[in-house]
């Protein structure tokens, strides 16, 4: 049976594969559409197996938020060329939308989701077959809260999400998310800074003061002062607000609503600081 353009177009629509790959698959199966789809899927699996030892260091990072749930997905690939491909970005968005709709709570749960009746893991393998590059879900972060926000930095390499004590106006939430993207805080407040980080900062401060010739009995006091500076630079609520340095993030939020504050945040960063 002769392969027609209509057959090729239909197979391309079903699989997203290139025209020549579709034509070849249809020729091999005598225009059996189901069998041709299976050939293309197997090609993706074969390419995936060959690329398994390659490094996927590029990719696309996107975020989304509903009233009480927000999430970030990072789909990784080998080159920036593929990362910017319309189909690759669309696949990342489709996976993210499915994860948010299901309120997925783990990377494994995301991989098991279905998009338009197809398993996410299988869709990624099929995309590998189209591009010839290794791909993998590199990260998945989620948060639940009374108020949520999200922000994708230009270029799809950096995304942030955050939750609040109550629903928040879109622009207010976005401003806070942009702060997280720009200033990369390590925690919401000083109480949530990991103990090992605090001890490390104190030790660094003591050693620096010692090298400056400060008296031994003064080292702890000096270190504590420098730790306070570290908190102001590294804790979100204590950071200077990037849009108004006269305010901290805490003061900015209190000016909006006296009961409004940040509960948690997540930041996924691919190849940029």
Image: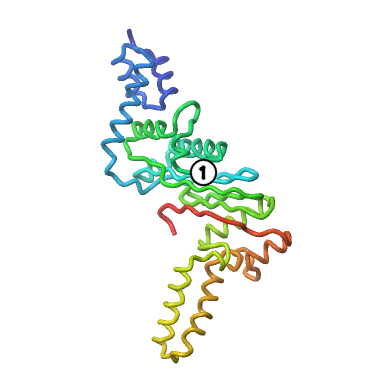
Nearer the observer, 31 or 41: 41
* Residue at the outermost top position: 1
Residue on which disc 1 sits? 105
Q: Is residue 203 left or right of residue 191?
A: left
Q: In this view, does 189 lie to the left or right of 95?
A: right
Residue 195 in the image: above or below residue 48: below
Residue 124 place in picture, x, y as percent: 40, 35
> Residue 249, located in which quarter of the rendered image?
bottom right
Q: What's the residue at 34%, 44% (across, down)?
A: 78
Mark 1: give few (<14), some (14-19) or many (20+) Cα within 10 Å.
some
Task: Tell me the quadrant of the picture where the C terminus can be found.
Answer: bottom left
Q: Which type of secondary structure does the marked residue at label 1 adopt?
A: loop
Residue 264 in the image: above or below residue 232: above
> Residue 60, located in which quarter of the rendered image?
top left
Residue 201 place in picture, x, y as percent: 45, 74
Q: In this view, does 223 lie to the left or right of 129?
A: right
Q: What's the residue at 51%, 79% (across, down)?
A: 226
What is the image's colouring?
rainbow
Q: What's the residue at 68%, 61% (across, down)?
A: 253
Q: How many marks?
A: 1
């Amino acid at each position: 049976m002769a392969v027609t353009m209509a057959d090729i177009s239909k197979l391309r629509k079903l699989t997203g594969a290139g025209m020549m790959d579709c034509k070849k698959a249809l020729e091999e199966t005598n225009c059996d559409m189901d069998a041709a789809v299976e050939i293309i899927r197997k090609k993706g699996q074969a390419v995936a197996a060959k690329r398994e030892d390659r490094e996927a260091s590029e990719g696309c990072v996107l975020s989304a938020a509903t009233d009480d749930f927000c999430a970030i997905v990072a789909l990784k690939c080998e080159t920036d060329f593929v990362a910017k491909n319309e189909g690759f970005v669309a696949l990342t968005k489709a996976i993210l939308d499915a994860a948010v709709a299901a309120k997925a709570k783990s990377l494994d749960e995301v991989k098991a989701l279905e998009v338009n009746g197809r398993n996410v893991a299988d869709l990624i393998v099929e995309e590998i077959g189209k591009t010839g590059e290794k791909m993998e879900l590199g990260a998945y972060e989620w948060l639940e809260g009374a108020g949520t926000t999200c922000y994708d930095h230009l270029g799809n390499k950096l995304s942030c999400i955050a939750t609040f004590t109550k629903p928040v106006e879109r622009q207010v939430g976005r401003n806070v998310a942009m702060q997280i993207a720009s200033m990369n805080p390590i925690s919401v407040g000083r109480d949530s800074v990991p103990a090992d980080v605090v001890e490390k900062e104190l030790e660094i401060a003591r050693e620096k003061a010692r090298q400056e010739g400060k008296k031994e009995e003064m080292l702890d006091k000096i270190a504590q002062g420098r730790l306070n500076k570290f908190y102001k630079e590294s804790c979100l609520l204590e950071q200077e607000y990037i849009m108004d340095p006269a305010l901290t993030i805490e003061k900015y939020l209190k000016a909006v609503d006296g009961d409004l504050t940040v509960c948690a945040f997540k930041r996924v960063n691919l190849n940029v600081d």
